[in-house]
């Protein structure tokens, strides 16, 4: 017997920069999941926790505890979009968190951002979904998604989490950047963060990303975490601090500047969790 003709047509491509629609959150527990790509990025979140208990999920270590009474689970995803997608999916499905916060460092594609400045993702997006053309110019498009849709490229931050971040900004005091001269106090503000699986990129690629997406920071995980949370109907917010300038070979600058950036992102993430704890107590 011959196999039947295919019923499904090849996927269509929708050119442009599709924006995620607001989706109602699914059922959840009163818990915040905090993710970082590497241990350096979550160390001070773990430091701020009480009643700590370690565990493993599919062999991946995590720490569970409390910040101002709020239940928090912290896990490290590993670097890159595939690792971040895998760990986020596992932990969201297991713990069913009300909120997912991704904290850590990112390169400073916006020259106005300084080492240690924190950008809260009013927008989180992916900059490597599309067709790369001459001169490293990307033609973006929405690819076939899992719900007979086209996956977005741009993901707005959750409104409730952005409101908590704004309250935290009003109270938070960053550490002084004493390792640089002249020293300064880093800022915390809303902005745009973009992700892709490239650590260093060419000047032409940087120019095209800035032209089309206008990001403040560039990193390697949060766009994928935003996409997972979008499809699993879980509130998401990205919190990143600027480390090295975005450049072709960032290795030395990243190693020198990422520790201070890691501290600032983690400490502000703790401030946001405290705002979430306060809001939960007010509801009771």
Image: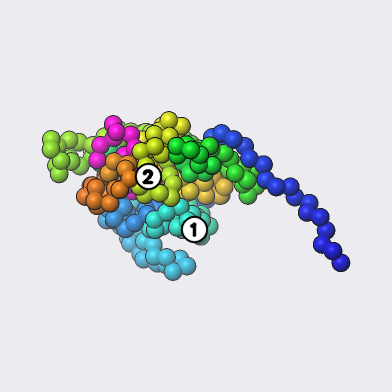
Q: Position of residue 53 (x, y in %)?
A: 35, 64
Please tell me whether residue 121 belongs to the stretch shown in magenta. Answer: no
| Disc 1 crowd, CA 10 A, few/some/many (<14, 14-19, 20+) | some
Q: Position of residue 179 (x, y in %)?
A: 15, 44
Residue 57 can be seen, yes or no: yes
Q: Quadrant of residue 274?
A: top left
Which residue, given by chain and number where applicable, does mark 1 sit on?
A: 86
In the image, the segment drawn in magenta is 102-115
Q: Residue at x 43, y 30 (%)?
A: 211
Q: Quadrant of the C terminus?
A: top left
Q: Residue at x 41, y 57 (%)?
A: 77
Left/right of residue 54 with respect to residue 138 in the rendered view? left
Query: Looking at the image, is mark 1 or mark 2 nearer the viewer?
Result: 2
Identify the mark nearer the N-term, 1 or 2: 1
Find residue 158 and name its label. Answer: none
Please tell me whether residue 106 belongs to the stretch shown in magenta. Answer: yes
């Amino acid at each position: 017997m011959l196999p039947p003709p295919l019923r499904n047509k090849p996927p269509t491509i929708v050119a442009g920069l599709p924006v995620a629609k607001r989706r109602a959150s699914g059922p959840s527990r009163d818990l915040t999941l905090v993710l970082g790509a590497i241990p350096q990025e979550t160390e001070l979140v773990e430091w701020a926790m009480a009643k700590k208990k370690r565990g493993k999920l599919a062999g991946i270590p995590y720490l569970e505890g409390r910040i101002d009474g709020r239940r928090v689970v912290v896990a490290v995803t590993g670097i890159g979009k595939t690792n971040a997608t895998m760990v986020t999916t596992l932990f969201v499905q297991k713990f069913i968190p009300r909120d997912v916060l991704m904290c850590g460092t990112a390169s400073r594609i916006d020259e106005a951002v300084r080492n240690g400045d924190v950008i809260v993702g009013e927008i989180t997006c992916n900059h490597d979904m599309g067709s790369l053309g001459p001169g490293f110019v990307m033609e973006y498009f929405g690819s076939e998604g899992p719900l007979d849709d086209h996956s977005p490229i741009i993901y707005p931050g959750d409104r409730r989490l952005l409101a908590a971040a704004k309250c935290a900004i009003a109270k938070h005091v960053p550490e002084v950047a004493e390792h640089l001269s002249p020293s300064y106090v880093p800022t915390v503000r809303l902005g745009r963060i973009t992700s892709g699986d490239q650590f260093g990129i060419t000047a032409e690629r940087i120019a095209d990303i800035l032209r089309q997406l206008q990001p403040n920071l560039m990193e390697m995980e949060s766009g994928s975490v935003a996409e997972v949370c979008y499809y699993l109907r879980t509130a998401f917010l990205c919190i990143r601090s600027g480390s090295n300038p975005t450049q072709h070979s960032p290795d030395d600058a990243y190693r020198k500047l990422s520790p201070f950036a890691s501290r600032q992102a983690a400490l502000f993430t703790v401030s946001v969790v405290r705002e979430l704890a306060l809001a939960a107590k007010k509801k009771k």
